[in-house]
Image: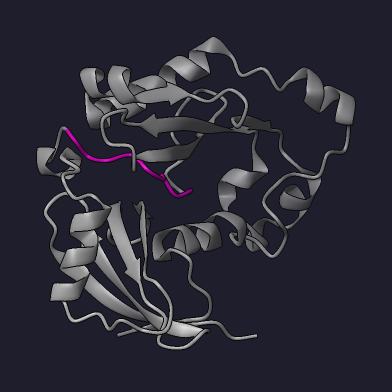
Amino acid sequence: MKTINKLKTIGSFLFLIVLFLTCSKPTEPVKQDEHSIVQNTVIPDFIIAESDSFIISKVGSTFFLNYIRYDSARSRYYPSDTFYLNHPSDCSNYLRFPNYLMVYTFKVTEKTWIDEIIEFAVDSAGNVITERSIYGIPECLSNSSHCIFGIDSVIAVNLAKQAGLEEGVKPWQANFHWFAGTINRYVWGVTNYLTDYSGKVVIIDSNSGNIIEILNWAVIE
């Protein structure tokens, strides 16, 4: 088992570390010229089309059309920034060049627990930047078993009980989310509280119901 500092959902926690701590400086570029950035916030259609095609290559066109939508409000254009240009050794290489953060919603009407986001970055030509984490895209075409999503919260809680998760001092929390890192798939995290500030979380594959791992968590002030 592993111990982490603060846990709401393991996958989201790990993703935020990767997303926001890739440099010694926050990844959002400094807005040297606010007016010029505002004028460039509309993302070109060809960038959106390339990004759509990338997702479709992973999930298939039918899955994409049924469940995934481009989110123009949360997608962003980031110009190159002098900090990254002057400190190349401190940051990921792609931050030194203009790039787009592409955000999509992933919702399945008949499975109300699926209301997630997909995020990845592309360069000014629309090429996916693999140096940055690709978040939330299931590999439906290469492995259709990753896109069944047959485990709901009730089943997840029952599986956690079977895995020996203790009752604890507060009601359990069951969260559906993308587990970034080595797992890179959607999971359920069923969390208990052995004290007000510590406990365990059972990570469950949201398709097969297999127990992936059981983690310790603790809040350290």
Of residues 123 and 188, the one drawn nearer to the viewer in this rendering: 188
Q: Is residue 109 found left or right of 92 in the rendered image?
A: left
Of residues 217 and 193, the one drawn nearer to the viewer in this rendering: 193
Q: Is residue 174 found left or right of 29 in the rendered image?
A: left
Residues shaded magenta:
132-140
> In the rendering, at what x and y percent does residue 193 appear?
42, 81
> In the rendering, at what x and y percent does residue 171 appear?
39, 72
Q: Residue at left 46%, top 85%?
A: 198
> In the rendering, at what x and y percent does residue 153 appear?
27, 54
Q: Quadrant of the C terminus?
A: bottom right
Q: Quadrant of the N terminus?
A: bottom left
Q: Residue at left 16%, top 49%?
A: 207
The secondary structure making up most of the magenta span is loop
Q: Is residue 13 found left or right of 66 in the rendered image?
A: right
Instruction: Look at the image and tell me whether residue 30 can be seen.
Output: yes
Based on the displayed image, in which of its 4 quarters is residue 179 positioned? bottom left
Q: Is residue 119 found left or right of 56 in the rendered image?
A: right
Compared to residue 128, the image places residue 172 above or below, namely below
Compared to residue 80, the image places residue 158 above or below, namely below
Compared to residue 27, the image places residue 189 above or below, namely below
Q: Residue at left 23%, top 73%?
A: 213
Based on the displayed image, in which of its 4 quarters is residue 113 positioned? top left
Compared to residue 92, the image places residue 49 above or below, namely above
> In the rendering, at what x and y percent does residue 140 appear?
18, 35
Indicate yes or no whether the magenta region holds residue 135: yes
Indicate yes or no whether the magenta region holds residue 186: no
Q: Residue at left 87%, top 31%?
A: 34
Of residues 154 and 186, the one drawn nearer to the viewer in this rendering: 154
